[in-house]
Image (cartoon, coloured by chain):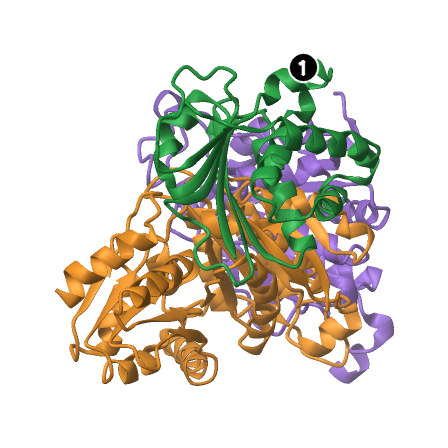
Chain colours: A orange, B green, C purple
Amino acid sequence: MGELRLMKGNEAFAEACIRAGVDAYFGYPITPQSEVLEYLMSQKPYETTGMVVLQAESEVAAINMCYGAGGAGFLPVTSSSSPGISLKMEGVSYIAGAELPLIILNVVRGGPGLGDIQPAQSDYFQATKGGGHGDYRLYVLAPSSVQEMADFVLIAKEMAFKYRNPVMILSDGIIGQMMEKVELFDPIPRRTIQEVEKQAPWATTGKKANRERNIITSLDLDPLKQEQHVYHLRDKYSQMEREDVRFEEISTEDAEYLLVAYGSSARICQKAVDLAREEGIKLGLLRAITLFPFPSKRLAELSNQVKGMLAVEMSLGQMVEDVKLAVNCRVPVEHYGRTGGVIHSPVEVLEALKSKIIK
Amino acid sequence: MTEEIIIAGFGGQGVLSMGKILAYSGIMQGKEVSWMPSYGPEMRGGTANVTVIISDERISSPIVNVFDTAIILNQQSMDKFEKTVKPGGVLIYDPNGITRHPSRKDIKIYSIEATDEATNMGNTKIFNMIVLGGFLSVKPIVKLENVIKGLEKSLPARHHKLIPMNQKAIEVGMELVKEYMG
Amino acid sequence: MDFKDIIKPENLVYRRSSLLTDKPFSYCPGCGHGTIHRLIMEVVEELGIQEITVGIAPVGCSVLAYEFMNMDMQQAAHGRAPALATALKRLMPDKYIFTYQGDGDLAAIGTAETIHACNRGENIIIFFVNNGIYGMTGGQMAPTTLPGMPASTCPFGRDVNIMGNPLKITELVAQLPGVHFATRQSVHTPRNVRRAKKAIQMAFEVQKNKKGTSFVEFVSNCNSGWKLSPVAANEWMEQHMFPFYPLGDIKVDGNLVTK
């Protein structure tokens, strides 16, 4: 059993980055995620693992530092909260286009604009449908506990290199700010520069005599070549959909109704399932762990079993569109959720289920 | 066993750290715990509150509307949280600065004059530990030895010399708390 | 005597650097970019550091610099090259890292990255080509466009009351403690080419000794954007650009040069 600690989600993420052998973190303060950089600086990993930690002059600079690091085959991490993530989106598009590894954490807060600093889930579209420009996707993981804020760093690391694609961890102010018990995994050493070059023969670490020069770019002025490049990206996203969909089911075996949720809303929904079962309502929960690729196939299967689904998310209704696409009108699908930084309660979720789905 | 607790008062009263020590004590006793604070500008001298859940089972929602126990340390928090105690639940408050005392009849109410006692003991910083002692007297969900282990875990090593004083404050609080009869 | 008797190593007076690729430059005839590319590659070759050098290309005319420089390179988003360079240098402190940027990239959209990389004293070289105009996008006003100088977005000349003043970014960054070496060069005459090459050598020396940021500006022409022949563009540059952007060292060995 690993080391047990009581930690905030943001701190657990930062500690996990050090332990996962992440090469560099570049960030900029914004509530409610500033603990990531604060924790890293308090631990001074540059003196132990050699991990570079730098407070950049802006979110824009931070994401472009990640581009540079990723282009040399290193694993960079950045984190921010909604308005800061919007600033990073240009860089994320470039990183996806240039096919570089990256872990990017969004501790979502209420929007749009400056919004507020309370928890929200209204950045789902940005995370899963683009956010930046061009035909690209992020691999998006949604942790629903402090434990997963740590553990998902390892999954993100694996996916970032498997697909040479940015991985977003889509968290929120609840998961970032709350403390829970965390069992920390044992540290994994950072790769040496030789190991980096072996794992990433495409990396710009200086042109060796025995190979062609390596170029990191997202530019191809020939549209036919650019089209081929985008088709290649599409093939990666299709592979993600085939091989790396993640989800969790709670009380679905006999469910007549289904909640669909992710992240902190899934925790709230879990309680709603308990409350419903106490009243004799056969309610289940599908928690999406990957938001892209989305667990559409499983939802389609469940649509043959349940009488209706309620997508619960702290937004005006974003993930609900993916649920509807998966279910393809076989059963009613509705949305419920507070937004703008207001957190819905398990009781509110249950009431919404009764009024919108069970009727 | 699942105990859902709200601790609410002014920023600076040690509300968040009391919750953290309680949560760490839970871990030391092998329980599942969650600690969910209010955060943001309101931390700067305004009201602060934290939800702590200690359970034998995996904790579902860290956000709840109603609580088994409310520990209330100022008037704004009384106005906000008295009504959120589950019927049959517990409300513990420090009457210092309270102008409207709790009035519910369907819950158990305890008072603890921790502000005065901390002043008497010559150290206002142990106020929150006195309150914690009061809570543990009413709801002995974690053993004192595990609270001490929790203190060791949550305090940096340079502050470990303060642990005996904190233990004393907890023990004082255990004796000080009394049922409020209205 | 035929040509085979002439092509012998002992008769060689000039050759193209092996670090330039075979791809013909896409720059306009008379443009300074080709010469500056060549000088940088010559210095890298002479220092024997090709295997430990990484360059960063900007957005602008030199966006495709990586097609001409036979070395590992990254292409940055507009203005962000110093951020990329920061990460590369910090992760690989023993390698040589340079950026190659134009005036719009470095002194407009990338001002924050430029100033903060310099202010942190990142141990990198920033090569800055200043031709007072946005060349690639078709001759729009740049942060370095001179007062009164026409461009497609100031067709009647830059009116500083409306469009603000041109930015002497090299003098500005020279004030920062992180900058060890700041200089302004040109490549329009053989003499200036030789001086420019010395400045490039100095910049790599500073990086080798881990002294901080080197900032090497080249005042250059843009005969397409300026709508002048190459010769006339160089004359115009001498008459108008150099008085406003005087050539010479601005900071050497961490000390501002007093004139």
The residue where tag 1 is placed is B119
Image quarter of residue C47? bottom right
Image quarter of residue A49? bottom right
Q: Report crowding for label 1: few under 14, some 14 to 19, many 20 or more residues within 10 A (C-alpha).
A: few
Give the residue at x 27% y 52%: A348
Amino acid carrying label 1: it is Thr
Identify which residue, A299 or C110, lies in the foreground: A299
Residue A263 at what x, y percent from top left?
43, 60
Q: Is residue B90 left or right of residue A113?
A: right
The answer to whether residue A246 is seen in the rendering is yes
Mark 1: which secondary structure?
A: helix
Examine the rendered structure and indicate whether residue A296 appears above or below residue A44.
below
Identify which residue, A291 or A289, lies in the foreground: A289
Q: Is residue B106 left or right of residue C173?
A: left
Give the residue at x 83% y 78%: C8
Q: In the rendered picture of this protein, how many numbered marks are placed on residues?
A: 1
Residue C17 at what x, y percent from top left?
72, 66
Determine the residue located farthest toward the left in the rendered image.
Answer: A359
The answer to whether residue C226 is seen in the rendering is no
Residue C193 at what x, y percent from top left?
70, 48
